[in-house]
Image (cartoon, grey):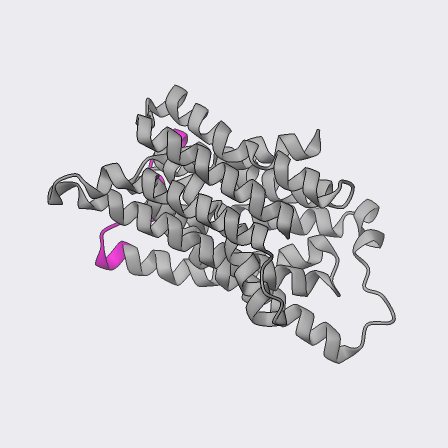
Amino acid sequence: MALIVGATAIAFAGIFVRLAETGPIASAFWRMFLALPILTAILAWPRFRTLNTLSDSISSVSLHQAKRAAYWAGVWFAIDLILFHYAAVNTLVAAATLESNLAPIFVALGLWYLTGAAPRPLTWFGMLFALIGAVCIALPNLLKPAAASQQWLGDLAGLTSAVFYALYILALQRARQQLPTLRAMCLCGLSAAAVLFPAAIFAYFYWQQPLWPITVTGWGVVIGLALISQLSGQVVIAYAFAHLPATFSSITLLLQPVLTAVFAWLILAQQLSGIQIVGAGLVLTGIYIAKRAL
C-alpha cells in the first residue's frame, strides 16, 4: 500500500510543475526547500531517532565518504529536477515522465562503468525496447515546424534527466551503505536546495522566470509539489523498499508514468497520439525488462 501511495504521489509531480506560477527551476527549488523542515522534524522525532542513529562500527573516514556521496546525490538530483521540470513545462507531462523513467537503464550502464560487470543480454534487450519507445514519443514533436521546436527540446531534457536521476540513485545507494535513509535524504535535500537556489535566481534575472508564486493557489501548488510529490513520494517509497522485494517494487513503480498520463489527460487535457501510446508501451516494456535483469 505504501508503495502504491508513493507511486501515485510522484505521478503528480509533472502536473504540479505545469500548474506552478513560478519558472521550472524555481518550482524545483521550492519542491526541495519546503520539504526540508518537515523531513528534519521527522528525523528529530524520538520515534524515528533510534532508527537513524549511526552505527558505532562506522569509521570517521567511511562516514565522511557516505556524507560526500549524499551531497553529490543532491547535486545530481538538482540537475535532474531542472531538466525534468523544464521538460514538464515544454512537452507533454506524460512524455516527460516516461522519458525520465529511463533511469534504470542508465543505472545499469553506470554499474557497468563502476564495477566492470557488463549488463546482461536481457538488459540490452530492454534498452533497445526503451530506445525505440523514446523515439516514438519524441517523433511527433521532431516532425513539427521549427516554431514548435521547444517541444522536442523538452523531450531531449526529459531524456537527459534520466541520466542525472541514475547518477542520483547510484550516489544515494553509496550513501545508504553507511547512513540511515532519512539522514541521507536530509543531506541530499540540503545539497539539492543549495544548487537550485542560485540556479533559480539566475533564471529570474536572465530569463525572467518567476521566482515565487503570486497567489494563494500558486503557493498551494508548490506546497503540494513539496509535500505530496517530494516528501510523501520519496519517503514513503524509501520505506516500502525496505519491506518489499526489489523486483516487485520496480514493477509496481511502473504505475507512475501510467498514472501521470491519466492525470495529465484528466487535469490538463493532454493526450498522447497513437504513435506516442505505442512508444509509451515500448518504454514501459523496456524498463520492466531492464529492471528484471538488474
- Identified at 70% across, 53% down, the residue is 182
Q: Quadrant of the N terminus?
A: top right
Magenta portion: prevailing SS class: loop
Total marks shown come to: 0
- Identified at 51% across, 49% down, the residue is 125
Quadrant of the rendered image containing residue 59: bottom right
**Spot occupied by residue 274 in the image (x, y as percentages of width and height):** 32, 26
Tell me if 155 is positioned left or right of 45 in this view.
left
**Spot occupied by residue 151 in the image (x, y as percentages of width and height):** 25, 42
230 w.r.t. 205: above or below: above
Tell me if 241 is positioned left or right of 126 in this view.
right
Tell me if 50 is positioned left or right of 262 in this view.
right
- Residue 214 shown in magenta: yes
The residue at the far top in this view is 266
173 w.r.t. 57: above or below: above
Q: Which residues are magenta?
A: 204-217
- Identified at 34% across, 32% down, the residue is 276
Residue 219 visible in the snapshot: no
**Spot occupied by residue 172 in the image (x, y as percentages of width and height):** 62, 60
Tell me if 20 is positioned left or right of 252 in this view.
left
The residue at the far right in this view is 56
- Identified at 63% across, 56% down, the residue is 186
- Residue 100 shown in magenta: no
